[in-house]
Amino acid sequence: VERRRMLRQCAPSLPVPYIEGIRNFTLTNEAGPCAMAALQKEQVIVENIEAEQRWPAWCAIALKNELRSCWSTPIVAHDGTILGTFAIYSRTASAPSSRMTALIGQFTDLASIAIEQKRREDALRRSEVYLTEAQRLSLTGSFRWRIASGEITWSDETYRIYEIDPATTLTLDIVQERVHPEDRNMLELTRARAPHEAKDFAFEHRLLLPGDVIKYVQVLAHEMHSENGELEYVGAIRDVTDRKKSDDILHRLREELAHVARVATLGELTAAIAHEINQPLAGIMTNASTCLRLLATDDPNLEGARETARRMIRDATRAADVIARLRALFRKQSTTQEAVDLNEATREVLALMSTELTKARVVVHTELGHLPPVSGDRVQIQQVVMNLILNAVEAMSGVPERRRHLVVRSVGTEEEVRFEIEDGGVGLDPESQDQLFKAFYTSKSDGMGMGLSISRSIVERHGGRLWAVPNDRPGATFAFSLPLASMM
Ligand code: ADP
């Protein structure tokens, strides 16, 4: 049950013990005349409290404080809600005169207007506070630009974005100064067109702030007409610098990964080998036929045959050299050494793959522990992580959706960091478990069987291990460990 109370707003001459005495009264008809007036929205006149029967508790407190009469009038808002009551107490028993009744009526009308006004102002102030807070959180400021007078009004957040002192009187020139010189044309154009075209506009540009700080902002403006019909624009300015930066990082990362993937594809390797080896092979074939021809007569040309055989050896050596060189190339594969935060690297890969994961209806749980950095080639390690995630996604593509959970876990110990990918997919076939990491082993019709073998060689090159275990529940867990940077 709701227990509402009445609060005393203002009662300068009422005895304090009386106010204290009725403080805990709840808002019911039985509490007292004011409560009743508020609930019934009707004036309640108690001419003589001594003769009053209705509210014994209230009467006792009133009498103890020498109050003898009480006229309580509700203050009602224009929509009918009750705002309070206005009560006149007296030390003598009496009824209000008609003049008094009229005055009370005027007073409660005024009071209702004043209270409503105050509440509206409070509500407005509160919503302004919310708005300012929301602008700050979303890094979005607002502005208003009146074309005829050139008057510009900004919200606090817009001043913050442009790093201009809020006491400054704004002009387009001041705003222009903050715009990156290379992007000023755009603003000039808007400035020239806006007064004539009266169209909404939106553009993105850079700001060049003191200390050579560059910010990216998005501007969105809506054309409106003020009360007196003048053209004005009202809009929002959003600081998108962070998003821009992470877009750039993602873009760079995507390119790097794509590059590594390309270099590592079997197709490219095959093409390179074929190209380099074909020539010496063709030479060997030609020389072998010549050699046979030189020997196939009654008088074999032994010297010529010897010469062609020498050429065959030369070509075969060349082919062997090519293979040796290719091997060396792949072994080195320009590994860079840097301190890598595996969690951060993993988060980047997940961000990169988020569309793919959503499309495959895979739910990802990350349990990334506190990790010291490992030392190695960030992009190559990311390639391993990506390979394992891709395999897990593929292993889950045929299972019911409720099983498509991927747990990405990292654990740090004193000597190493461990990374685990747990899937709810088809799981491991005990027969072929030893084969998985061999080059060319695949169970997929369109698989190449290179992913795990390349991943294992990358991990081992970093001094770590890569392995797979079946889960207790359906699915498999692929894991690798890497030694800490400080242990290398
Ligand atoms: P590919 O993906 O091209 O087949 P990989 O070397 O990455 O090559 O994987 C080899 C094989 O290992 C796969 O064909 C699959 O049979 C098995 N495998 C890899 N990851 C998983 C996994 N998460 N669950 C079950 N089997 C897997």
Image (cartoon, rainbow, N blue to C red):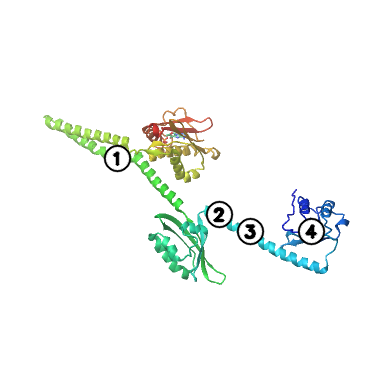
Q: Amino acid at mark 1?
A: Ala
Whichever of labels 4 and 3 marks the residue nearer the N terminus, that label is 4
> Is 23 positioned to the left or the right of 427 in the image?
right
Number of the front mark, 1 or 2: 2
Q: Earlier in the sequence, mark 3 or mark 2?
A: 3
Determine which residue is flagged by label 4: 37
Residue 474 locus on image (x, y percent): 52, 32
Describe the element under mark 4 as helix, strand or loop: helix
Earlier in the chain: of badge 4 and badge 2, it is: 4
Q: Nearer the viewer, residue 152 or 48?
A: 48
Image coords of residue 345 (percent x, y): 43, 41
Q: Which disc is residue 272 wearing?
A: 1
Q: Which residue is mark 3?
A: 123
Residue at disc 1, secondary structure: helix
Q: Residues within 10 Å of mark 2 (few under 14, many from 20)?
A: few
Q: Amino acid at mark 3?
A: Ala
* Of callouts 1 and 3, the N-terminal one: 3
Q: Is residue 78 visible?
A: no
Residue of label 2: 133
Circle nearer the N terminus (1, 2): 2
Whether ligand 1 has any atom under 8 Å from the Cβ at mark 4 is answered as no
Write the residue at 45% across / 40% down. 346
Q: Amino acid at mark 2?
A: Glu
> Where ligand 1 lies, by quadrant?
top left
User: Local crowd at mark 3 within 10 Å, few (<14), some, or many (≥20)?
Assistant: few
Name the amino acid type tagged 4.
Ala
How far apart are the alpha carbons under marks 4 and 2?
Answer: 41 Å
